[in-house]
Image (spheres, coloured by chain):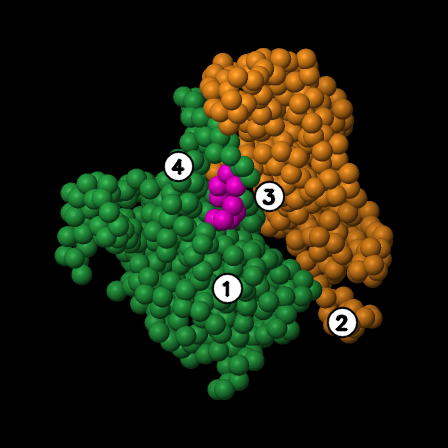
Amino acid sequence: MRSEILTRRVFVKGGACALLATTAAPMLLVRTARAAEGRRRVLVAVFQRGAVDGLAMIPPYGDPAHASARPAIAIQPPRRGDTERALDLDGFFALHPALAPLMPLWTDRALAVVHACGSPDVSRSHFDAQDYMESGTPGVKTTPDGWLARALGTLPDAGSPLRAVALGAALPRSLRGDRGAIAMQSVRDFDVRAATSAAAPRGFEALYEQGVRDLLHGTGRDTFNAVKVVRTAGAAGLAPAHGAQYPRTRFGESMRQIGQLIRADVGLEIAFTDVGGWGTHVGQGNERGQLAVRLQDFATTLAAFARDLGDRMADVVVLTMSEFGRTIGENGNRGTDHGHATAMLVMGGSVRGGRVYGRWPGLRVDQRFEGRDLAVTTDFRSLFIEVARRHLRVAPAASIFPGWTPRAPLDLFA
Amino acid sequence: MLWYLDNWASTRADFVIPQGPNQGRTAGLNENYARELMELHTLGVDGGYTQGDVREVARAFTGWTIDRPREQGRFTFRPAMHDVGPKTVLGHRLPAGGGQADGERVIDILARHPSTARFIATKLTRRFVADDPPPALVARVAAVYQRTDGDIRAMLRTILTAPEFYAASARRAKIKKPFEFVASSVRALGGTVDTRGAEALARAVGTIGERLYQAEPPTGYPDRAEPWINPGALLARLNFALHLSGNRLDGVRVDPVALVRGADRTRPDDVLDHLLGTVLLGQATAGTRAVLAAQLEDARVVRKTADDHGPADTDVGLLTALVLGSPEFQRR
């Protein structure tokens, strides 16, 4: 397999230019060769903004303090054949019943959980904690760039204007500092669609081609390059494959379009999107209710994405994260307040799934962080660096997380 | 805020709900409002409060609730929900039994705190001067806040008369937010907008990234350039410019030709200069003017008659869209 790709690469370099000028059959070859070239590894980072309750996502039903800490909102422990309760993973941890769409991936060992994962910083501010996780420097606010931008910066640049794409209205902090990173709300609308004559896009492009070096002009130049690639690749026209059905939610739409960009071989290496609604301060619910509805969307979307990509998932890892978890005990309103550690998911690639990683700190009051929250036993950077090195093949010497030395690896990847 | 940040339901630890669907259940403290009040509305995240202060402020605000909260009711204080014990907020002692006055006292403590002065001064200066406001000006504005007990008018006077405000580096330093871009586009073109048009414009603002009244985080929308300038958002601006100038927004009518009244339409560069005068107040850079002038060579921008002997006619709508999409028009 490897030698085949190598051959194709050599072929592309040596012959593609000459072939471009000739007829239909060789063009097909060029496209095939390009597709092979385009199959580089992709990381899809999903940020659950608002601090998701890891204890509800992946309830530690085997912990003796679990049920009593959450009289109204603990997820009922698994019972064989009962899909209304937690779904057993390993005899200690379970899946929230709303995450049932992920169970086949777990069984296939394509999905791993890292529990009690989070930041060593004590902040319970959403904004600081998101900032620290995305910059990759807990406690340091002056870091100018994001960890994904730094990771991408260490990888060889094959020249695509779409190496890093965030689905959303703004570029996330994680990708800040990458000069070419692109934010878009919609693949289909990523064009000068309102133009009635080709003069308009040409005119706009010329306005931003001027030699001025500032945010606006730089963005303009990136924009028009990327527009051409997305248009040529026909990304917007790709229907989900293998009968995958994404929910018609914002998150579903984002992941569907990330799937389009990957399958259209636009040269994507890092995709980012976020999904909100996790701030369950009041009426969190248990097997059903507010949080369950959000988790249902989350899981259905991730499962649809895996199905849509099919074999391609061998090159793609989805990593989920959240700025912190929520209190172990429920608050006065059957909700949970800002806590500390949470659970993160790793799906696809060569992940050694079907396992919950990380040391379990326990839920007893004396085992808690500051007497109230789930303690962090896995620094989020340990997880992120492993994904960067083992999946994206970032060189071990590269400094993705300045001022921090990785400890023993989780050994998440085969 | 009592509703959005959950304080309406926050109670003393042992409060038993007397009626309603949760009757008989013990409620308790909810920290959400207390934390965001200090982090986002007064002291700022580095303003010097602790998790302990968050709990104490939450205790002080217990009982600050809403009468019939699901029916848009009004503020009410319910003594039964209130934690009557003594509290210590940022080193200030609140004696037991303060009742509703506990929360008022907390607001006073927070409002007079030097961190709040700096926080509000930074936000105002960022809004009116630059994304990264000059620290010396922020310090002066914060001092005015403290001296005048938070008189926003006096703070604004300080900003608007400051040399930093008139500095060349502050000129067009701010990127228009999507709302500002859309509103200034319609105004620059003298557009008329009916009810449907208002809806179309609100949708356009959302497409460019600022869904009105739907900012998800409690910070509201950012007042800095980076979150608003990216390829997707820029394309949305360009598409809006084309839709607006081409009269393709339902309920919004513009007349680009009226903008160049007095211009000789057979002389495309005269049309362009009129347009730049009206829409950009004559402040286009030489580079932008040159790029736009070059577009006039395009037969799709300046139409010739069929036999190429009649007078030329300039596509003012298209040219207007290009001006609205120019880098200069993205700044204010």
Q: What residue type is disc 4 on?
A: Asn
The chain to which mark 4 is attached is: A
Q: What residue type is disc 2 on?
A: Asn
| Within-10-Å neighbours for mark 1: few <14, some 14–19, many 20+ | many
Of residue A162 and residue B99, the one placed in the foreground of this image is A162
Of residue B10 and residue B276, the one placed in the foreground of this image is B276
Q: Residue at x 59, y 74 (%)?
A: A287
The chain to which mark 2 is attached is: B
Q: CA distance from mark 2 to mark 4?
A: 58 Å
Q: Which of the two labelled residues, at mark 1 and mark 4, occupies the earlier sequence position?
A: 4
Q: CA distance from mark 2 to mark 3?
A: 41 Å
Q: CA distance from mark 1 to mark 4?
A: 29 Å
Segment tinted magenta in the rendering: A185-193
Disc 1 target residue:
A246
Disc 4 target residue:
A225
Residue A186 highlighted magenta (yes or no): yes
Residue A361 as seen in the image, left or right of residue A414: right
Q: CA distance from mark 1 to mark 2?
A: 36 Å
Above or below residue A201? Residue A330 is below
Q: Position of residue B164 (x, y in %)?
A: 60, 16
Which of labels 2 and 3 is toward the front?
3
Q: Quadrant of the C terminus of chain B?
A: top right
The secondary structure making up most of the magenta span is loop
Chain painted green = A
| Mark linked to residue B207 | 3
Does label 4 lie on the same chain as label 1? yes
Disc 2 target residue:
B22
Q: Position of residue A193 (x, y in %)?
A: 52, 41
Chain painted orange = B
Q: Residue at x 62, y 49 (%)?
A: B216
Q: Residue at x 39, y 72 (%)?
A: A106
